[in-house]
Amino acid sequence: MPKNKLSTSDRILQSALQLMKEKGFHLVTIKEIADAANVSEMTVFRHFETKKGVLEAAIERNTVVPGFKQTLDNNIVWNLEKDLLQIAHLYLDLMKRYESICLIAVQERASMPELVDLVSDNTEQLKGYITTYFNSMQEEGKMKQTDSYTQASIFLTTLFSYFISNALWKEKFITVAKEEFIKNSVQTFCYGLQP
């Protein structure tokens, strides 16, 4: 969406995330955020009070959890491979959309551990949804009996590794195309979990 079609607060958040991704949280000033969003510094303060408030609002507004849960609730077909393919695509698409927030969390992990907590809370919720799905699949006899939480953690960690490698190093670390990576990862995962 073009910047002039966004609300003032959305323009501020979008500009702030881009600047923080490029320069890091501590090096970006409220003045730079205001200039990039085409607003006054006072407008930024009125909407968010502090630079940290801007970042926290961006994280809250850009959580991947609602879209992820809605897909799980509405589109699951109770076929392990098809469902995991769908979940993998959804997860990587959502993470790409919120790449700025993840990279800022990585950059500022030592100076702002609470930011990592906010991001990890989202991940924990996603693991919870996948754990519930795996438990249901086990109850139906469609998946080997195993620790669902650990399997959900392994599945998301595999996907997150692909995402963060590409976000940090583009194709210099993992040269496999996203589609091929998802297909092979899901096939391998399903092979180990088929009853």
Image (cartoon, rainbow, N blue to C red):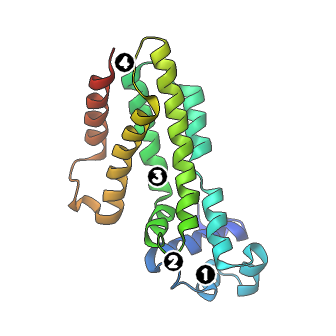
Q: Earlier in the sequence, mark 4 or mark 2?
A: 2
Residue position marked by numbered label 1 in the rendering: 33
The x, y position of residue 9, in whole percent, is: 71, 69
Q: Amino acid at mark 3?
A: Met
Q: Earlier in the sequence, mark 2 or mark 3?
A: 2
Taking the image as shown, residue 158 lies to the left or right of residue 134, namely: left
Mark 3: few/some/many CA within 10 Å (<14, 14-19, 20+): many
Q: Amino acid at mark 1?
A: Ile
Rendered image quadrant of residue 181:
top left
Residue position marked by numbered label 4 in the rendering: 144
Q: Amino acid at mark 2?
A: Leu
In the displayed orientation, state which residue is furthest to the right.
46
Rendered image quadrant of residue 67:
top right
Label 3 sits on a secondary structure element that is helix
Residue position marked by numbered label 2 in the rendering: 19
Q: Earlier in the sequence, mark 4 or mark 3?
A: 3
| Residue mark closest to the camera, 4 vs 3 | 4
Residue at 52% x, 78% y: name it. 25
Mark 4: few/some/many CA within 10 Å (<14, 14-19, 20+): some
| Residue mark closest to the camera, 4 vs 1 | 4
Q: Earlier in the sequence, mark 1 or mark 3?
A: 1
Residue position marked by numbered label 3 in the rendering: 95
In the displayed orientation, state which residue is furthest to the top.
141
Q: CA distance from mark 4 to mark 2?
A: 46 Å
Tell me, yes or no, whether the two marked residues, 4 and 2, touch with CB atoms within 8 Å.
no
The x, y position of residue 189, in whole percent, is: 30, 30
Instruction: Tell me if residue 14 comes above or below residue 134 in the rendering.
Output: below
Label 1 sits on a secondary structure element that is helix
Label 2 sits on a secondary structure element that is helix
Tell me, yes or no, whether the two marked residues, 1 and 2, touch with CB atoms within 8 Å.
yes
Q: Earlier in the sequence, mark 1 or mark 2?
A: 2
